Amino acid sequence: MPSSLSSLFRSLGRLVVLAAAGFGPVAAHAAYPDHPIKLIVPVPPGGGVDLLSRAIGAKMQQSMGQPVIIENKAGASAAIGTEALAKSPPDGYTIMMGYSAHATNPIFVAKLPYDTSKDFTAIAHVGYIPLILVVNASSPYKSVQELIAAAKAKPGQLQFASGGAGAGAHLSGELLKTTANVDIVHVPYKGNAPALNDLLGGQVTMMFDTITTSLPHVKSGALRALAVTSPKRSPLAPDVPTMIESGLPDFDISAWYVMFAPAGTPKDVVARLNAEINKAIADPDLRRTLGEQGVEFTGGTPEYAEQFVRSEIDRWGRIIKTRGMSGN
């Protein structure tokens, strides 16, 4: 073989090796996902977090061509599901729908089995849902001020239910305690759905629930709505005043939702998941269906989601410290 041809083949051989080395990892990532994705929901089935997760997971499954399997891992104010995510491989095949407890658990809980600031990467800020203060329809209280008056007349006797410490329902109840200077008892459950069931059964006095899950019961006559926690009235319940209108200044809380992956998940995989979530929440059918239930979608980049979570940790750290809120 002429020396010139030998040199050519040797050069081509080196190029093949370099191409394989250079493009092997890209090809592997380009195949993502090649098997099912697990979406951890750190609450029981039936609440707002669960309903939103299932709706988005279904859209992602259609778009990505792989099953998105919902796994409810409830308990310890989302810490059980969050620990499971922290201990999962950072490969994009295990993600989690987080909510406000993600930001408040490190404030309320002295020793978590994970590091909130180091063990996760935010994928996307999905959106938020206003909360609504509801009582059983048989309750004698027809306004926030009547409820406050009763709480002051009977300290320690009225209860507020929540889906667990650190959830929006819990934070709202604590904010009511400190803003109105009343002594009401927190009754935590392993999710909003069982808490709401006990409110419907008359076992607890009140609950700050997502408007998504409580409004149907208000419309059916099983519950009575006293106020919403957003700064403006909800178009879904225009006759229901805000907590601010009811005499409690600066009372502004919503239930928010952010999708997370384990820290160290490759950036291109996070970017793919971010694009799929943004695509899902831009779907007209999903926006109409969940919008009618009170969900307000946010979307945006992973960087925006990360900044939002850090700002919530800082915000609630200041509020909890200033107002002396309890984590129980």
Image (cartoon, grey):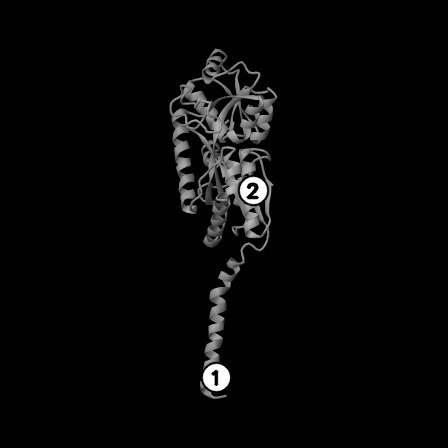
Relative to 138, say whether 124 is above or below. Answer: below
Residue with the mark numbered 1: 6
Q: Which amino acid does label 1 sit on?
A: Ser
What is the x, y in percent for residue 325?
A: 44, 25
Q: Which mark is residue 40?
A: 2
Left or right of 255 in this view: 40: right
| Label of residue 106 in the image | none
Identified at 51% across, 59% down, the residue is 30
Residue 185, percent from left and from top: 51, 20
Task: Identify residue type, mark 2.
Answer: Ile
Q: Position of residue 305 (x, y in %)?
A: 43, 43
Query: Is any part of residue 263 visible from this angle?
Result: no
Give the mark nearer the N terminus: 2 vs 1: 1
Residue 224 x/y as whole percent: 53, 20
Q: How crowded is mark 1: few (under 14 residues within 10 Å), some or many (20 or more)?
A: few
Q: Residue at x 53, y 31 (%)?
A: 212
Residue lying at 57% horizontally and 49% vertically, measured from the top left: 62
Instruction: Identify the secondary structure beneath mark 1.
Output: helix
What is the quadrant of residue 213 in the picture? top right
Residue visible at 58% across and 24% down in the picture: 220
Q: Which of 45 and 223 is in front in this view?
A: 223
Q: Residue furthest top?
A: 153
Taking the view exactly as shown, the residue that stands out farthest to the bottom is 2
Is 186 drawn above or below residue 306 in the view shown?
above
Neighbour tally class for label 2: few under 14, some 14-19, many 20 plus, Cα within 10 Å: many
The CA distance from mark 2 to mark 1 is 57 Å
**Tags 2 and 1 in contact by the CB under 8 Å rule?**
no
Residue that protrudes farthest toward the right in the picture: 201
